[in-house]
Image: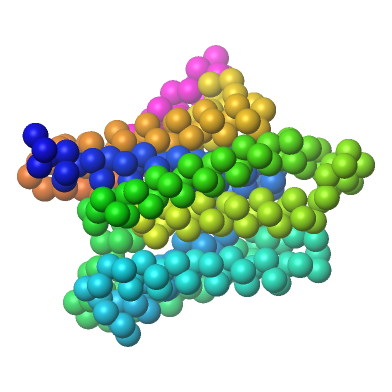
Amino acid sequence: FEMVIELRLPRVASAVAAGVVLAVAGVILQRLTGNDMASPEVLGVSSGAMLGLAFGVFFLAPGQTGALVGTASIGALAIMALILFLNRRNGFQAERMVLAGIAFTALLDAFIGALAATGDLRSLLLLRWMSGSTYGASTSSAVLLVGLSVVLVGAALIFVRGIDLLVLGGEMAGSLGVRVRAARASLFGLAGLLTAAATISVGPLSFIGLMAPHIARQLGFHGARAQILASASAGASLMLLADFIGRYGYFPYEMPAGLISALVGTPFLMLLLSRRRA
């Protein structure tokens, strides 16, 4: 029993924490942009983390987890900082932030795809990580991700007033006492950190960030605080279920949680949408 706990608990904790942070990042982005299709990958942070990981795999030490986590972290933070820097003069307008993120994502994905297509055996590590899985979760990485999720979600809850008011538009939010530029920059930066935390730990599982906020809205949670908490619960539940199915659905083989999450979550979301229309 102790061995089962030792092997499974880090994966379960990583799956739950990743689902939470991606869901909260999705809530922030969808509310800031006013676009229900916005999700964490539009910031380019996931691609930045993948580029950092690719650099570590091909040019440093592919077998050293600590070094790879470090290079992935640097890549994610560098892209986030670059996007914020490029948009500082336009007041961090949501549309320009998203367009910059999409452009960087396309560029970096093309570069990473070229590396993965070289046939080098090291590219297999990239492909496994890009599929989104908890295969490599350890006790230390799980503790770090859980700790980051608590801190970052707590920070998101501090900003709930600004999130609610920014939905009304920059001019209206400013008249109600919100420092619009600072709030936008802080919230986009927070969404980037949330995305980076999950991406570095379990890979680019961005579909959770798109789907969980929709599920929360369909369940009747519309205020920023309520939607953040409900989305976090939905994201955690979906990732936990996806990890369980991926582990035991095709035993003794395993399937990545990133792929299973889409298979599990999409029918549930479609069911909620069909009931709401009825």
Q: Residue at x 62, y 69 (%)?
A: 81
Tell me which segment is drawn in magenta: 262-278
In front: 124, or 64? 64
In front: 34, or 185? 185
* Residue 266 magenta-highlighted: yes
Q: Position of residue 233 (x, y in %)?
A: 45, 30
The answer, for residue 247, to whether it is visible in the render is no
Q: Residue furthest top?
A: 278
In front: 250, or 273? 250
**Quarter the C terminus occupies:** top right
Q: Residue at x 49, y 66 (%)?
A: 76
* Residue 43 magenta-highlighted: no
Picture quarter containing residue 173? top right
Q: How many marks are shown on the rendered structure? A: 0
Q: Position of residue 12 (x, y in %)?
A: 28, 40
Q: How is the image coloured?
A: rainbow
Q: Position of residue 72 (x, y in %)?
A: 41, 69
